[in-house]
Image (cartoon, rainbow, N blue to C red):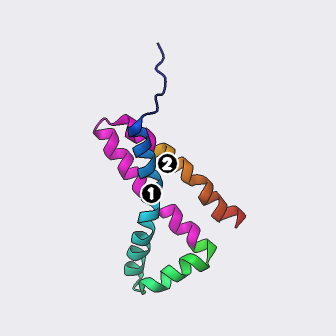
Amino acid sequence: MKRRFNWNTRTTAGMIIGMLSPFICVPLTILIISWAQHYPFSLFWDRFFMDLNVMSKFLSLSIIPNLVWFYVFLNRERYDLARGIIVGSALFLPFIIYVNLIR
């Protein structure tokens, strides 16, 4: 007997977490890289908005926290939240493709 996928509020919450987490983690990623390379944060922040190569790299790195969320929800057996994280990450993909290929 096959079980159908049921969309519920937890899946929506996971999707929202999966979509907002990269936007929140972009400044954190820039901050960590600026500390590691001993440059001011404002230099990398300006380059993030001006250079498309830099933007695509930082956006790709900011998706990594979704893996942490996914792992945490799987360990707590919150499969609907983990499924929402996957959907949120997949919905973020067109934006990354736009930055990398079109713009």
Q: Position of residue 30 (x, y in %)?
A: 44, 74
Q: Position of residue 35 (x, y in %)?
A: 37, 80
Question: For the residue marked with disc 2, what is the amino acid?
Answer: Gly
Query: Residue at the location (37% across, 35% down)?
Result: 79
Kind of element beneath mark 1: helix
Q: Residue furthest right?
A: 102
Q: Indicate yes or no whether the magenta region holds residue 59.
A: yes
Question: For the residue marked with disc 1, what is the amino acid?
Answer: Leu
| Quadrant of the image occupied by residue 74 | top left
Q: Indicate yes or no whether the magenta region holds residue 10.
A: no
The reply to whether discs 1 and 2 touch (Cβ–Cβ < 8 Å) is yes
N-terminal label among 1 and 2: 1
> Image check: 9 left or right of 98?
left
Q: Which residues are magenta?
A: 55-84
Q: Position of residue 16 (x, y in %)?
A: 44, 50
> Image check: 65 left or right of 52?
left
| Quadrant of the image occupied by residue 33 | bottom left
Name the residue carrying label 2. Answer: 88
- In the displayed structure, 54 sits above or below 70; it is below
Name the residue carrying label 1. Answer: 20
